[in-house]
Image (spheres, coloured by chain):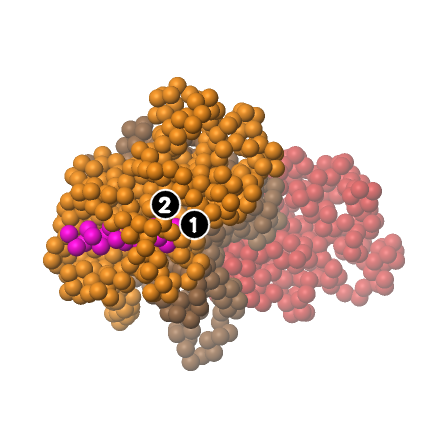
Amino acid sequence: MTDLNIDSLTMRFSGLVALDKVSFTVKENEIFSLIGPNGSGKTTLFNCINGFNKPQNGTINFCGNDLLNKKTYRIIRSGISRTFQNVQNIPFMTVLDNILLGANSRIDTLGTLKRLVSRDQRKIEESMALEIMDFLGIANYEQKFMMGQPFGIQKLAEIARALVSKPKLILLDEPAAGMNDQETREIANIIRDIRDELGVTVLLVEHDMNLVMSISDQICVLESGKVIALGEPQIIKDDPKVIESYLGEPLNA
Amino acid sequence: MKDRYEHENLYWIPILIIFVFLLPVILKGVTFSYKYYLFVLNLAGIYIILNVGLDLLSGFTGLVSLGHAAFLAVGAYTSAIMVDQLGVPFSLSLIFSPIIVGIFGFIIGFPALRISGMYLGLTTMGFGFIVKRIIISFRDWTQGSAGLEVSSPVLFGYTIKSDWDNYYLIYTFVIIAIVIGRRIATSKIGRSFMAIRDSEQAAEASGINLSQYKMLAFFISGLFAGFAGVLFAHTSSFISTDHFDILLSIYFIIMVLVGGASSIYGAVLGSLFIVLLDNLFVPLIEDQIQLIFNTQAGDIQSLIFGLIMFLFIIFQPMGLYGMWLKMRIYWKLFPFNPRQRFT
Amino acid sequence: MKKIIGVLIVIGLFGPGCVKRAPSPGITDSEILIGNVQDLSGPMKELGAIIPNGSNMYFKYINDQGGVNGRSIKMLIEDHQYNPQKAVAATKKLIEKDQVFCMFQVIGTSPCEAIRPILAETGTPLIAPATNSGTMSDLTKQAGDLIFHTDTGYDRQAEILVDYIIGKNSDAKIGLVYQDDDYGQNVLLGISRVELKYGVTVQKESYQRGAVDFKGQTMNLLKGGLTDVIIAGIVREPVVIMKTAEAMNFKPNFYGTGPTIDARVGKMAGSAGEGFTATYWAYMWNSDEAGPKLYRELCEKYDIPQPYIGLYHYYGFATAMLLVEGLSRAGKNPTRNSLVKGLESFDEWKSNTFPPITYSRNDHAGVDKVKLVQMQNGEQVVISDWLE
């Protein structure tokens, strides 16, 4: 039952319709990609799931919980974490501490108070982060300040921050933006690993078609807030509407 | 997973603590003006406690407070009234006064939910003025602007009276404050504070309740200021509203900035640096400057403060602690391109 | 290694304060060191420069004559910005670090109150605090036995003023504007005593130290239909109040206590200040007594700049005379104790700057009478003899 059900979601910003009756379902352990031209409403959809935006109509349902009634900071406790399109890291903290930020929902009040009197709690917390850092291969960077780290590391650190909360669903907003081919291939592997090894469902927004087509189980194409196509990569690739509005020409991937 | 603490050099912490407790003895051996130096160090100690709290609020959480002199005042007056007029023992006042100041900070924190940056600074500054007025108007309790005499602290039947005793009292709490400040800074709370400062989006997405943590920052900051206030009132034996003015709040912010915002050790270094500069260094060079320019003592103080702020912000935005970090890394890696490591 | 460097730094920092302990602090074979805390950059900074200059002039005169028992007097001045806490720090520095023999002339009521514990702890006498507050001569307070007050208390001044007003016009309706701090409290103390004595009620208006607008207070005074108003202010307050009153066409007789004696009050207030009467507790600096004559001679001799010469400069001079007399009575090898003893031996001591001063073990009050000084055609004219 760890499905994400989005039903006729409508979001308007003072007249501009950003999302128009969007409906789809993300099944458990799936890599689900959202694609579409700029301004088609992908990030708005993320923000709706995440609680930053409150849609006027429709429902978002995760594991049987209605997400729309929840405050943003509660969403992570429902098992959904996210990354941002423009990386949102804390520059004056170490990479390790940045990642630990995501572990907040795993540390209860008692643990917080324990930290004030003992150092062991810090070790427990660090082990949470180091586990994920090892997984993503950035463990060497733990003690370095986030400020001035290469963009790739910052991206990975953000993914690690989203993963350390042990989510059931992770929202990745353009993880491969601004990366070269090799890095993009690494990201693709990582996303697959996230699903396969950690068992986390992935909802992905990405512009890199090769990446999307190669790893997605399902793809949803948005245009001007409307769903124009939904299905497996092969179907999308051949969909005339998608080709016309977005892909331009058939892909040969 | 490797155990990281085995590689970390922590041996200097006990050495430092021993040094802090031996310092009066060393001073007494070296100079017989030691009482004055202890007095200055005591003042620095009280400011360290307050600035650790202020750093958590303004440095970590990014909520600028120009009302910390008022926090100090509330702590000082609360404790003075509780101990001298209500007969509460000092040791209990040491617990309750900070909590009262914490609640006071909590109330002042409400505007922070809506405004930030300079506007918040101005709001807290306004609170400072209000507090001063309130203290003056409750004349029956506070003696108005005349100032209030405060009794010496009594702990476990022992009256702490001289600068010497005060030093040990204050620095015990300074060490506790630094340790707790460090622990808060490296705990979930500290990370959340910094996240709120640098990216509210990331903070919220990571499950941080912004309003709750902003209020918490004010509360914690109030606790530290309250501790400082209690110690201030009872060790200086006389408090007056004149001392808790806006200039003092600005000095606190300067101490935090000079030390390096968002590092606890920075707040400590900044407080020590400014207080020692103010009381020991400036008087030394004052006469020399006065020979060249025909100014008066107070003017030179402001001049030097302005100059230090100016130079620090231009050359050392990360403050004294940042300087120390850079130096340490520089020496560790000395021959191998040390500049690149710290960017 | 680091530790050694640390210790060296500490020694370097604190070393300069390391001097040999003299038999009595501040006393060497050739020098007596005294400490003074003034307001050099706060609200009263004009006085902070002028008063000690007057004292230094007299010290120089004495030093040129060979000093007190062969020791010359040296005065160290610190700044407290009219902030009691800073006064405490400055006094600590003077007593603990610079090792002064005694404190002298600390300005302001609140600062003087704040340093009482240090005086008591170290047994340092404070001679001639530059405040009129009657609390300074209260022997029951902390360190009261170490403070030697020269000036007539504000409470006494207020009493004398009301006596004078009622003596002139028994139907007078009196108002008071006071500064809301120790100064004002001390004035109120005196006022409450005369209220009891004459069965009158004085209309009281307060203001905060540093206030610049007195419209509200003046309006209230106007509504009260007063004939006489006492202003317990410093310099700016009486000027603004009198000007505001003139603008409102409200013309009672104005009186002032303590620092309002400053000649600038009348000058700055202009026509509004005409007839303003203030209390003064010494001989006028430009009168023909022996003290003021010596003062004017010395001013000429030591080339004192013109703006300095006047009432406050003279006050510094006069209190310096008192200190020097006290030091000379303290014996060949003065101690703090013998200084107190020496001062307590004053019996109708005539300096010709102050009226005769008597101190004893049970009385540290100094002068307790005033003369009234009125502004007439822009000049300060003494209009009464000593009033008690």
Q: Residue A179 location, x and y as percent?
A: 66, 66
Q: Residue furthest front?
A: C288
Image mark for residue C108:
2
Q: Nearer the viewer, residue B22 or C337?
A: C337
Q: Nearer the viewer, residue A125 or B214?
A: B214
Q: Colour of chain B?
A: brown
Q: Quadrant where the C terminus of chain A lies?
A: bottom right
Disc 2 marks a residue whose amino acid type is Gly
Image mark for residue C44:
1
Q: Residue B40 location, x and y as percent?
A: 31, 54
The answer to whether mark 1 and mark 2 are in CB contact below 8 A is yes
| Mark closer to the chain start, 1 or 2 | 1
Q: Residue furthest top?
A: C199
Left or right of A70 in this view: B257? left
What residue appears at the point 52 percent right and 55 percent down from the top-left corner? A98
Q: Colour of chain A?
A: red
Is residue C320 found inside the magenta-colored segment of the image? yes
Categorize mark 1 by other alpha carbons within 10 Å: few (<14), some (14-19), many (20+). Answer: some
* Range drawn in magenta: C311-329
What residue appears at the point 62 percent right and 47 percent down from the top-left corner? A169
Disc 1 marks a residue whose amino acid type is Met
Q: Residue furthest bottom?
A: B335
Q: Nearer the viewer, residue C370 or B270?
A: C370
Q: Residue A27 location, x and y as percent?
A: 68, 45
On the image, which quarter does residue C29 sit in?
bottom left
Q: What SS does tag 2 mark?
A: loop
